């Protein structure tokens, strides 16, 4: 029988864990964070978000099925005192075929939208797109708008509803360029042009 002190310790420990869980889940809300990727505002970001949703759904389905079969097997086939030694067997062709075919099907179901997304995001934007030359410097970004003969520092201004074509490079070291709600992250290298597009 537990004494009163042990019960209080267990209850307070459980309370602390629940409070931490609530705080962690509350901090995951995408509403209060303007730099979140969970609320895409551009077509490029929506392609990546749809791909993430598809992958997570497949992963969740696999997790539920595998854990369900595991729990069923544990409960159904658990040993009891006095049970004889189980029959020893080696291999089961039908089971081995099943656990090869099912993962292959799942990988194909994830590969199709992934390849489609790669081709969509790698496509060359139309000639009507606004070209912005992006130059990474140590500790700041330079944005050049050749169409308007304009240059800005650290602030990218883009029109709504018009495709923006970014041609990115760097004057010094490798940088990572990311516009979370509009597009994916791209690494920018010296002496090499990296391209990305999006439409806000």
Image: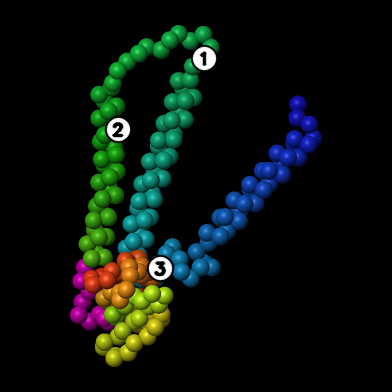
Residue 40 versus residue 162 in the image, above or below: above
Query: Would you call the spot at circle 2 few (<14 residues within 10 Å), some (14-19), or many (20 or more)?
Result: few
N-terminal-most mark, 2 or 3: 2
Near-viewer residue (99 or 165): 165
- The part of the image, by quadrant, that contains residue 146 is bottom left
| Residue 180 badge | 3
Residue where numbered disc 2 is placed:
99
Q: Please name which of the two marks, 2 or 3, marks the residue nearer to the observer.
A: 3
The magenta stretch is: 123-131
Note whether residue 164 is visible: no
Report, in whole angstroms, how far the alpha carbon at label 3 lies from the one at label 1: 56 Å
Give the side of residue 78 with respect to residue 188, left or right: right
Which residue is located at x 37 percent, y 61 percent? Answer: 49
Query: Residue at the spot x=25%, y=30% of the render?
Result: 97
Which quarter of the rendered picture does the C terminus lie within?
bottom left
Numbered label attached to residue 80:
1
């Amino acid at each position: 029988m537990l004494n009163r002190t042990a019960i209080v310790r267990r209850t307070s420990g459980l309370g602390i864990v629940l409070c931490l869980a609530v705080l962690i889940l509350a901090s995951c809300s995408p509403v209060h964070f303007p730099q979140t990727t969970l609320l895409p505002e551009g077509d490029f970001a929506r392609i990546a978000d749809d791909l993430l949703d598809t992958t997570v759904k497949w992963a969740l389905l696999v997790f539920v099925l595998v854990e369900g079969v595991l729990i069923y097997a544990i409960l159904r086939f658990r040993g009891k005192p006095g049970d004889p030694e189980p029959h020893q067997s080696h291999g089961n062709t039908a089971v081995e075929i099943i656990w090869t075919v099912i993962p292959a099907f799942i990988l194909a179901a994830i590969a199709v939208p992934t390849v489609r997304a790669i081709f969509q995001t790698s496509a060359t934007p139309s000639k009507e797109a606004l070209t912005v030359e992006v130059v990474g410097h140590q500790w700041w970004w330079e944005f050049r708008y050749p169409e308007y003969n304009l240059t800005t520092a650290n602030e990218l201004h883009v029109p709504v509803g018009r495709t923006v074509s970014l041609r990115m490079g760097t004057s010094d070291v490798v940088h990572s360029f990311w516009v979370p709600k509009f597009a994916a992250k791209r690494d920018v290298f010296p002496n090499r042009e990296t391209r990305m597009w999006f439409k806000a």
